[in-house]
Image (cartoon, grey):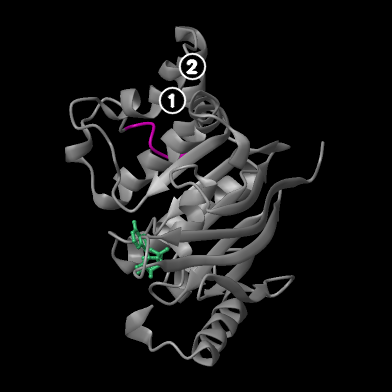
C-alpha cells in the first residue's frame, strides 16, 4: 500500500471579499504518511483550524489540491464528499459532540449505523475499541454521567470504530485539565502505536504537542518550521517545541 496518505499541495484559503479579505492559508504544502502522529501548532490566527477544516472538507480551499488516500478532495462533489467523510475520516473535537440522549455504546457505534453495518459486527467492533480504550464498563451509561476525560475517550472510540484512514483532532484537550490532557494523549499514542491510526492534531499546548512524533509550526498560513521526534524522548521534544515557540516570537498567552 502507498505509504503516503495525505498530500496538501499549494493550498490557499481566503475569507471575506472586497477590502476585508483575510488570507488564512497562504500556499501551504505538507504531506502525511500512514501511521504518522502529527501535531500542528502556531499562534492564534496562524491558520491551524482552517488547515484542519479544509482537510476535513468542512471548508473549501480557494485554490490548491488535497489528496487523501489517492483521491483529490478539492475536485469532489457534495455527495462524494459525504461518503468520503464517512468512510475515510474520524473526528475528535474540543467539545465532545456526544449525543446526550444515547448511551455511550450507542454514541460509539453511530458511524457504523451510518454505514448500515450488521448488528453482530457492530457489537464485535464496539467491544474491540472499548477494550482498547479501557471504557468497556461505561457503555451502558449516558454521557452526562462521565467525566470530561472519559467523554473524550468515548469520542476517540467513536472516531476509531469504523477504521478511518485519518483521524483529525482540533484542540482535543481544549476542555480538559492537564492530568486529563495527558491521559488523552496517552490514548492517542496508543491509537497510533497499537492500532496504527494516522492522526493529525491541532493544539496550542506544548505538552500536548510533545506526544506527537512530528510537529509542524504554522505562521501566517504557511509552514514555518518542523520538529521531528526521531529517537528522542518526549521531554526533549517538549523542550524543542518551547524553543521553537520562543523563536516564533509568540507570547505564551497568544498560543
Ligand atoms: N469563517 C471565517 N471568516 C472570516 N475569517 C476567518 C474565518 N475563519 C478563520 N478566519 C480567519 O482566518 C485566520 C486563521 O484562522 P484560524 O482559525 O485558522 O487560526 P488558528 O490558528 O486556528 O487560531 P486559534 O488558535 O485562535 O484557533 C484568522 O485571521 C481568522 O480570523
Residue 136 inside the magenta-drawn segment: yes
Distance from Cα at disc 2 to Cα at disc 1:
7 Å
**Residue sitting at the far front:** 18
Q: Answer left or right for 94 relative to 117.
A: left
Which image quarter has ligand 1? Answer: bottom left
Mark 2, secondary structure of its residue: loop
Q: Main secondary structure of the magenta part?
A: loop
> Observer-nearest residue: 64 or 201?
64
Please say whether residue 187 is visible from this viewpoint: no
Q: Answer left or right for 142 relative to 86.
A: left
Residue 178 image point, x, y percent:
33, 68
Kindly indicate the quadrant of the structure image that contains residue 101.
Answer: top left
The answer to whether the beta carbon of the residue marked 1 is less than 8 Å from any atom of ligand 1 is no
Residue 32 image point, x, y percent:
68, 54
Residue 123 inside the magenta-drawn segment: no
Kindly indicate the quadrant of the structure image that contains residue 176.
Answer: bottom left
The residue tagged 1 is 111
Residues at marks 2 and 1 touching, judged by CB atoms closer than 8 Å: yes
Please say whether residue 179 is visible from this viewpoint: yes
Residue at left offset 32%, top offset 28%: 107
In magenta, the rendered stretch is 132-137
> Observer-nearest residue: 62 or 145?
62
Residue 51 image point, x, y percent:
51, 58
Q: Quadrant of the N terminus?
A: top right
Q: Characterize the local packing of mark 1: few (<14), some (14-19) or many (20 or more) Cα atoms within 10 angstroms.
A: many
Q: Quadrant of the C terminus?
A: bottom left
In the figure, 135 relative to 192: above or below? above
In the figure, 98 relative to 213: above or below? above
The residue tagged 2 is 115
The answer to whether the beta carbon of the residue marked 2 is less than 8 Å from any atom of ligand 1 is no
Amino acid at each position: 500500500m502507498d505509504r503516503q496518505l495525505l498530500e496538501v499541495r499549494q493550498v490557499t484559503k481566503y475569507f471575506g471579499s472586497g477590502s476585508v479579505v483575510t488570507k488564512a492559508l497562504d500556499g501551504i504544502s505538507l504531506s502525511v504518511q500512514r501511521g504518522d502522529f502529527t501535531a500542528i501548532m502556531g499562534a492564534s490566527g496562524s491558520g491551524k483550524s482552517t488547515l484542519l477544516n479544509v482537510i476535513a472538507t468542512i471548508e473549501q480551499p480557494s485554490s490548491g489540491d488535497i489528496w487523501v488516500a489517492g483521491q483529490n478532495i478539492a475536485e469532489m462533489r457534495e455527495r462524494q464528499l459525504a461518503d468520503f467523510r464517512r468512510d475515510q475520516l474520524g473526528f475528535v473535537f474540543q467539545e465532545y459532540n456526544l449525543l446526550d440522549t444515547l448511551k455511550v455504546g450507542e454514541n460509539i457505534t453511530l458511524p457504523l449505523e451510518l454505514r448500515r453495518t450488521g448488528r453482530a459486527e457492530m457489537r464485535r467492533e464496539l467491544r474491540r475499541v472499548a477494550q482498547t480504550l479501557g471504557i468497556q464498563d461505561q457503555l451502558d451509561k449516558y454521557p452526562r454521567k462521565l467525566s470530561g476525560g472519559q467523554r473524550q475517550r468515548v469520542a476517540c472510540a467513536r472516531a476509531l470504530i469504523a477504521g478511518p484512514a485519518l483521524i483529525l483532532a482540533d484542540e482535543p484537550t481544549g476542555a480538559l485539565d492537564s492530568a486529563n490532557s495527558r491521559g488523552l494523549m496517552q490514548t492517542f499514542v496508543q491509537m497510533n502505536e497499537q492500532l496504527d491510526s494516522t492522526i493529525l492534531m491541532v493544539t496550542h499546548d506544548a505538552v500536548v504537542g510533545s506526544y506527537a512524533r512530528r510537529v509542524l509550526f504554522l505562521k501566517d498560513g504557511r509552514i514555518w518550521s518542523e520538529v521531528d521526534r526521531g529517537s528522542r524522548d518526549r521531554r526533549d521534544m517538549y523542550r524543542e517545541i518551547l524553543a521553537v515557540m520562543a523563536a516564533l516570537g509568540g507570547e505564551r498567552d497568544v498560543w
